[in-house]
Image: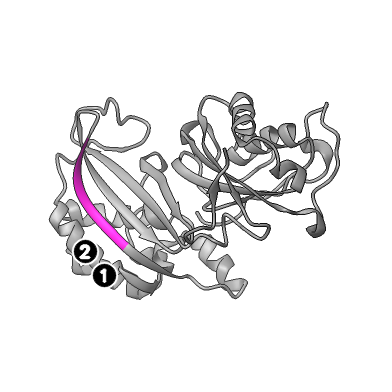
Amino acid sequence: MDGIGARTSGNAALPKDVPGDGVLTPDEVAGTLVLRVGYRGAGFSGYAEQPGQRTVAGELRRALETVLRREVDMACAGRTDAGVNALSQYVSVPVTADELARSGRRTAASLVALTPDDLSIRGIYRGGASFSARFDAVERAYRYRIACGPARPVMAWGHSWWLRTAADLDVDAMGAAARCLLGEHDFRSFCKAASAQLLESDGRSTCRCLTAVDVTRVREAGEELIAVDVRGNAFLHNMVRIIVGSLVEVGRGHRDAEWLGDALEARSRQAAGPTAPAEGLTFEDVAYPQGALEPWG
């Protein structure tokens, strides 16, 4: 989930009426434009750009390159999979001094006009010349929503897992099981196997630090849901969805609470539970050091 999406290169990414001035050199960078974006994931093949696919990064790139009239380099705080929703994902773009002098309100209005209805420009900020939405993030937060029972969700449709075969889940048992995940651990068991192998081959770690894994009952828009809130410094591919799928095994009584700790220690994807569906996951927030960003009015 976490990373930088691939970028298209050359002027092919630009609209026909936009000159291809090229991306900025380090000497040209005076600051960073940072967007806080949200989106409904159903219509996207995830965040990262992919040839022939509709993606969040692809839509943002078209809008940004139209407004700035040049190619852009983008970094994101957390790459999401196809179908995953977001309320506060941050995207950063290096900009020139002239671009920094523009009205943030007008820039935001232009981006709103150029983006589709399932992608929201929720805030615009300025950062320093070296700011990166990805590398300066200190914490990321996700919420996973579950709707239990035979009644089809109404307002939660599209952003919850309809677990129709379970009338309820044991929230207390799920919470007890989740405690073993707190702190820094090797989360290889909770990473998509192919991605874990790729990280290992590149010499990168599958260790991450979780500061919260909370399982609660919530009422949203008149519907009773179970929410799993997860916070951490960074996340592996499918990590939150595998954690949720594993916790649901405990909540349904298929596994005891101690099983999750055994799965964590095994460092094998086969030891953990199934991957929960993408539509129940929402990227909720990102934390940055105090003073790293200022609103761009």
Considering the image in quadrants, where does the C terminus appear?
A: top right
Badge 1 local density, few (<14 within 10 Å), some, or many (20+)? some
Residue to which mark 1 is pinned: 180
- Residue 248: horizontal and vertical position, in percent? 24, 52
Residue 124: within the magenta? no
- Residue 23: horizontal and vertical position, in percent? 80, 48
Residue to which mark 2 is pinned: 177
Residue 227 to residue 174: above or below: above
Residue 216: within the magenta? yes
Q: Are marks 1 and 2 in contact (CB under 8 Å)?
A: yes
Checking the image for residue 76, the label placed there is none
113, 189: nearer the viewer: 113
- Residue 232: horizontal and vertical position, in percent? 39, 62
- Residue 177: horizontal and vertical position, in percent? 21, 64
Residue name at image x 60 percent, y 37 percent: 55
Provide the residue span drawn in magenta: 212-219
User: In which quarter of the view is residue 146 placed?
Assistant: top left
Q: Is residue 285 visible?
A: yes
Left or right, 200 with reference to 256: right
Q: Amino acid at mark 2?
A: Ala
Label 1, secondary structure: give it.
helix
Residue name at image x 83 percent, y 39 percent: 11
Label 2, secondary structure: give it.
helix
